[in-house]
Amino acid sequence: MPLLAAGPTLMDATPDVIEKANNYYREIARRNWEHNNEKRAKTPDKGKMGRVYKGRKVPVGTTGEIIWYGHGKSYGYRNNTMRVGIKDATDKVHWTDVDNVEVVNWEQYLYPEDQFYYTPHFCVRAA
């Protein structure tokens, strides 16, 4: 009977089954890592280049470096809005809601695939 514990799990599985299980969990971890990597790269953040693609107060198409990212002052029902400051080519800073901005050339902010790592869940127990 297997031992249930918070630490390493002892299993009565063959090495082939353990390898298949680790390969399965490795694939799940890789998919999650790729999804989170892309999501992080597309999220506006300080130092990235951003473009305003919607909104009323800042002209659509305004492009520049995001120099500030944080909580903005808000009055009314949206008390926890995130805002960005974008410095354009004329050194003018435009302030807008983070939802109005997309990252330009987001592919350059992806982590390289060699930074993915996986720690196996299961291992063969020495007899």
Image (cartoon, rainbow, N blue to C red):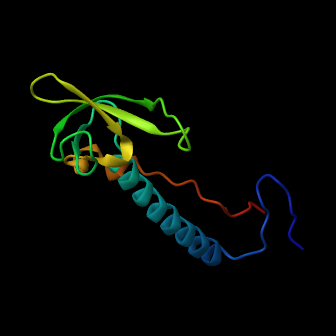
Residue placed farthest to the top in the image? 91
Q: Which residue is at 19% across, 48% downward?
A: 105
Residue placed farthest to the front in the image? 76
Residue 114 x, y percent position in the rendering: 35, 49
Looking at the image, can residue 110 be seen? no
Q: Nearer the viewer, residue 24 or 15?
A: 24
Q: Is residue 105 above or below residue 92?
A: below
Q: Is residue 109 above or below residue 16?
A: above
Residue placed farthest to the left in the image? 90
Report which quarter residue 77 is drawn in.
Answer: top right
Q: Which residue is at 48% across, 68% downward?
A: 27
Q: Is residue 2 above or below residue 96?
A: below
Report which quarter residue 15 is drawn in.
Answer: bottom right
Image quadrant where one finds the C terminus:
bottom right
Q: Is residue 47 left or right of residue 123?
A: left
Report which quarter residue 89 is drawn in.
Answer: top left
Q: Which residue is at 90% across, 74% downward?
A: 1
Q: Nearer the viewer, residue 12 or 105?
A: 105
Looking at the image, can residue 100 be seen? yes
Residue 67 x, y percent position in the rendering: 29, 26
Q: Which residue is at 45% across, 31% downward?
A: 72
Q: Nearer the viewer, residue 78 or 18?
A: 78
Q: Is residue 28 left or right of residue 6?
A: left
Q: Is residue 109 left or right of residue 63?
A: right
Residue 21 x, y percent position in the rendering: 61, 73
Residue 64 x, y percent position in the rendering: 18, 34
